[in-house]
Amino acid sequence: MLTLFFCSSVWAETSVAPLKERTTDEQIKVDQQVFSALEARLEALNLAGFPVDSYIFTKASKWLEFAFDEYTDNDKMGIVEDALYEATYLTRLMEGGALNIISGTPLGSASMKIRNDLWDRVAVLKEQAGFSCGGAKVAELEVMLVWAGHEYKELGFQHAMPYIEKSEQLAREASVIVSSCKSSPSSAPAVAVHPLKATTTPLKRVLAQEVKKLTALADRVHFALGQSSMSRKTRVILDQMASILKTHLAIRVALHGHTDKRGSVKYNMALSKRRAEAVQSYWVEVGIAKERLTIVAHGEKHPTVMTQSKKGYAKDRRVGFFFENGGEIERIRQEKDIQIERTKHKKRGRRS
């Protein structure tokens, strides 16, 4: 009965309006207060001494991030309520004094299990002694895998790919941290929160999206037919982005190069890589550390539109950006620098 009451009371704290009722500013404001209240509870836990880099705190924070992102994206599948429930449930456990706890990761009906190899790695990492060092990264990986499964179920593989790539990176990082950890896992029982000494470092924002975005960055730049050199408009966009990256030093950027579908596969793969390298080189020249910039070449494999037109091809000739450690970054679709070819290009083997 106690468990039933606990769960039902958690549900009562996580009630946001169904999608069809999120039509007025008043209702949206009420729903946003649910997210803000839970964020405030996490902040209070940290100010009372609860470590941000603990497994349970990170997992609650990431569930909340997930819930808020899908709310702002008008999710129709119920993942908002599921993720909010998990965030609130873990917050209640922390408020009750739980510290050394490892929770399960339910998928619910709005997600699905993909990448069994990564889920298997999560299970292995939880069993290793170094989990005491890498628990926070493992918690982030678990939530990201649920997020990837949700995107896959809702819109398919291509839409889920950035979340899968993020999961792969988190798995690599977690493995490195756990394997290099020198300390042994704590065998102490759960530690009460309130007696802990308050930390002098207040909680930094743990949500990837907030009610007010602090900044926004373009999600791509474009190139001319068969070219890896950049136009003046593209350089202006990259300069604007560089100024933000210089003030947010933790942010890393994956540069995904693409071409349109014309020409040979080999030529396009090399061209897509040169385009990503061109962006990397430009940012390095203006002061962005090279190790913050990762290159991924896709060639022609991921067109943005199915229409085979000059404008459609121009949209495909791009380098896309995916940001890591950029909780306050909003990705904005950018097409101001699209370069539509003027004459038909007839040579096979040359493409954009």
Image: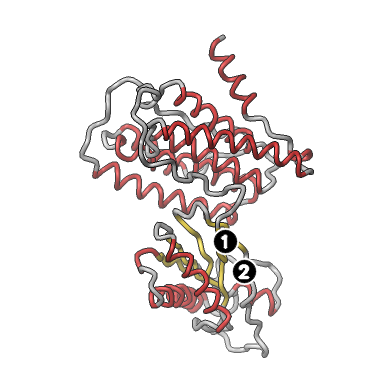
- Please name the residue that numbered disc 2 is placed on: 334
Q: To which residue does mark 1 refer?
A: 216
Q: What is the residue that sits farthest to the left in this orientation?
A: 182
Looking at the rendering, which quadrant does residue 38 occupy?
Answer: top right
Q: Would residue 331 be found to the left or right of residue 73 on screen?
A: left
**Which residue shows up at 40% across the image and 28% down it?**
102
- Is 225 or 263 nearer to us in this picture? 225
Q: Percent from the top left, x then y, of residue 217?
A: 55, 64
On the image, the x and y values in percent for residue 193 come to 39, 25
**Residue 283 position within the rendered picture, expressed as x and y whole percent measured from the top left:** 43, 73
- Give the residue type that dot 2 points to: Gln
Horizontally, residue 133 falls left or right of residue 277, namely left
Q: Is residue 335 above or below residue 183?
A: below
Figure colour scheme: secondary structure
- In this view, the residue in front, 29 or 237, is 29
**Image position of 2 (left or right of 50):** right
Point out residue 175 in the picture as x, y percentages from the top left corner: 32, 45
Q: Residue at x 63, y 38 (%)?
A: 80
Vertical position of residue 233 compared to residue 67: above or below: below
Amino acid under disc 1: Ala
Q: Secondary structure at mark 1?
A: strand
* Circle 2 crowding by C-alpha within 10 Å: few under 14, some 14–19, many from 20: some
